[in-house]
Amino acid sequence: MNYPADLKYTKNDEWVRVEGDSATVGVSDYAQDQLSDIVYVDFSAAAGAKVAQGATFAGVESVKAAADIYMPVDGEVVEVNGALAQTPEAINSDPYGAAWLAKIKLTNPAQLDALMDAAAYEAYCKERSA
Amino acid sequence: MLELPKAQPTELIYDLGAPGRTGVQMPAPDVPLADLPSGLVRDNLPLPELSELEALRHLTRLSQLNHSILTGFYPLGSCTMKYNPIVNEEAARLGGFIHAHPLQPAEMMQGSLAIMYHLQEWLKEIGGFAAVSLQPAAGAQGELAGVLMIKAYHASRGQSQRNKVLIPDSAHGTNPATSAMSGYRVVEIPSDARGNLDLEALKAECDDTLAAFMLTNPNTLGLFEEGVQEAIEAVHAAGGLVYGDGANMNALLGIARPGDLGIDVLHYNLHKTFTTPHGGGGPGSGPVGVAAHLADFLPGPIVGIEEEGSEEMGPVYGWHQPPKSIGRLKAFHGQFGMHVRAFTYILMQGAEGLRSVAEHAVLNANYLRVKLQGAYKVPYDRVCMHEVVLEGRWADAPDVHALDIAKRLMDFGFHPPTNYFPLIVREALMIEPTETESKEVLDAFIEAMLTIAKEAHSTPEVLQQAPHTTKYGRMDEVKAARQLVLCCEIPREVSSEQ
Amino acid sequence: MTFVPHTERDRQQMLEAIGVKTIADLFEAVPQKFRFPKLNLPAPLTEMEALGELKGIAEANESADDLVSFLGAGAYHHYIPAGVDSILRRGEYYTAYTPYQPEISQGTLQAIFEYQSLIVALTGMEVSNASHYDGATALAEAVNMSHAIHRGARNKIILSPGIHPQYRAVVHTYEDGGDLQLIGEDLDLSAGPDALIELIDEHTALVCVAYPDFFGRVYDYTKLAEAAHAKGALLAVSVNPTALGLLKPPGEMGADIVTGEGQPLGIPLSFGGPYLGILTTRNQYVRQIAGRLVGETVDSRGQRGFVLTLSTREQHIKREKASSNICTNQGLMMLAATTYMSLLGKSGLRQVAESCYHKAHYAATEIAKLKGFGLKFKDAFFHEFVVECPIPAAELNLRLLELGIVGGYALGAEYPGMQNCMLLTVTELNSKEEIDYLVETLAEVAHA
């Protein structure tokens, strides 16, 4: 299981990569492993939408589970990764890279401080696998 | 491992037949022909063209690819896969029933109405209810009826602020789905360490926004809720009503009446408890029973007595629309053919027979429980009711999953138990043997399960690659979902023969 | 007769293994005051006695088979080839359940896949589910689907008054209390589909019509579909599948959802159920469809096989977010329809449809010639038509019944102002002789 050190994580297994006042959001390696083979991705928010922390902006489905994806922090959607509709399996193979879900403009960066760092998140995942 | 022969490929219906063939010749019209409506006649009807033998051989061969109750043990938890008496099939096909049109006047249909009336009465008696409607098409629709009745009841009392439904985390998915369809907010109630619902969590939600609590008892862990009375009292005290999910009634026949326990409304599953066939996935039939305060809200029409009978003449039955009915749930009168089958079953059981059904269902499940304990972890270790839930995982065999156990059971000729449900047990295996299986069958199943538990440790790959002896191996469900193919290729071109 | 195989010896051995003395000991968790209630039920009967009793009860019905019947109105008396029941009687089908384990359920799975295919072919649509409860509930699910497809942003549903009144009643049961607004049912019955077009606006999620409609009339809904699409709304058409043996399928008219009552496809009248709900749509809406779907795949040995797919739409995974709460399909009825369509095939279903059409038109023509009788509507029709009679239809039906005829559906009960109107149905089972007898009898009893 991979927990890149440069990311922040949520209890719902999303990750955030901060680049200045923008950020990229996706789901973690742990999440894709729990869901197993992803077969479908659906975005309920489009570019321009203001999404509050904790609100749903996408859904991913495997054959046996469906999960809502929540916005880790307040933001305005700049772009969603529409290509995933054709290649949902990228979430399994490259969750931190090609399978990013959304790029956002941060509107309340202070919220980032409350997210987990890689070490805390790794501990959190291990606790759930026990 | 041996190279296994592939099954003879099963053709699709569109691969069979030839242009010009038909399985049935219909008589030519014996009346003068009328003009067909211009512009509305279809150019092509792309149905297959098979001889009668081709069609029936195809469907017969397909049937042989199924596991069924008639061909083997089918301990699918929560589904009550018991023997479906053949006599039910005879009864439902009697000419008077099968050719009865649903809109014929009640006076001409006294036989059908008598069946429905008595079934209503018997289901009242069995469940301890004041009234019953047979209209719901299946258990899930019975749930919808029940929740809509609860909503209408609260509205009639000026209590429309009641907007939430409490549902245990062990419940069937239909419970939250139904509540959401009815416009309610769902609050999940956790289970405790003994497999009961957490009473304190339940009580914390009992306020004046509470519409209903949906209770499955025995719950999906196969356990009788030990706090059932306290839970129901708390819900009632807060002004809420209790919905009973009757999926597990096979454990309660003649043992306890849900109505006596205080349940306000409950659906029965005729295809589980009362031996109407499961039919490869349906039809179900989900009558609802209610306490007196909900009787006026039942979906209707239901059957009542128009004129009392005398010694020489039976009563006259008629349709009756409950005054505050939530309305119709389906066209006509419910799954009548299933009513006849359930009627036939109850007629042959009587009160003692029904109690014996529940007793032996529970005896069989507990026998499996004690025999499998040890080899498998029983997460809630106490006397169970009609089904037992095991964990299909071992710390020292980390790569074996419940799914592997399920698939390996097929090699022994058994249908697997329900797996991965209830959601609160990890790697759940939910086993419901039912009362119609003999001790010999259970012993053979136990032996297979014990063998599999050993294999899980010694040769896990045998499980992971199972099944080995069935005509088909594991299916690629990911491919099915990613590259959706939901029908045959339909020939779209206009045929030359039209 | 309990069908319980246990001997006394079995019971003793099992109780001993469990470690209790009696079976009653297994029920200690049940509150004592409610334990083992005495049920007041009739004494049990043997199979021989029970079947005897049931025969007596069945004979108390005067069924459509004993009489000459012209009653339809949503449930139809058709010839069912003998082969259909021979398949339904196979225990491998009727004693199996939902095919959760595909390795040992390929029979049911492939039968569903073929059913989906045949329904797609018949309706001209792209996706069919594995079946729904009945025609009425399938229509209610179409309404829910349209709401979901628009992600809740549109709340107006147009229901044609030509839809079966019981179907509309079911839609009301499902939707009353929700935020959808149902309109259109009070339109003039003679107005036709153009009147519906005027109701469509940018809040409209769905327009629902029937084909043939409740009064037997058939319209080309192409213009209606175009008008709906122009405003971003969807069109749902509720069909009688027999008519599609002859008539242009709604898929060719631009329908987005086609529902229907599949009972005419080899399912007996059986006093109203179990029947078969048809539910189909376009590929783009497949994730919003309710109920099971079977898809093609391959197994670990490379063989073609079938599985339940897109299950994430369903209640056992999505729970309160599911597209519907349904968790069965009408499996056995689906199998009946599959067998029926396989046996009749391309030419057989066309023959049945044409036979219904010609006989109904013969009957309508002859009845219209009678003094005091006339056809209520001038529109094209399939195998049902409304006759305006010189006396109340309910009254006329009583007189017909005395002479062995089950007349048509008396419309006055549902439609005030149509007391004298009767909806007559003619199928391939009605011979010319029967039709002539109906015509003669109508003339005789109407003026008696």
Image (cartoon, coloured by chain):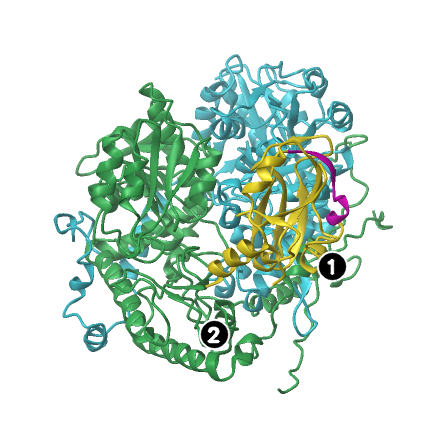
Chain colours: A yellow, B green, C cyan
Vertically, is C108 above or below C136? below
Q: Which mark is residue B14?
A: 1
Relative image position of residue B187 (x, y in whole percent): 40, 39
Vertically, is B79 above or below B451? above
Q: Secondary structure at mark 2?
A: helix
Relative image position of residue C156 (x, y in whole percent): 61, 22
Q: Which mark is residue B409?
A: 2
Let me know if residue A83 is in the magenta part: yes
Which span is picked out in magenta? A75-85
Choose top left, top right, bottom left or bottom right for residue C161.
Answer: top right
Q: Secondary structure at mark 1?
A: helix
Residue at horizontal 60%, vertical 40%? Answer: A112
Q: Which mark is residue B492?
A: none
- Three-letter amino acid code at disc 2? Leu
Of all residues, the one furthest to the left in this rendering is C33
Q: Chain of mark 2?
A: B
Residue at horizontal 62%, vertical 13%? Answer: C188
Relative image position of residue C164 (x, y in whole percent): 56, 28
| Left or right relative to B43: residue C236 | left
Q: Quadrant of the C terminus of chain A?
A: bottom left
Q: Nearer the viewer, residue C342 or B14?
A: B14
Compare marks 2 and 1 and give the one earlier in the sequence. 1
Q: Nearer the viewer, residue A126 or B174?
A: A126
- Mark closer to the observer (2, 1): 2
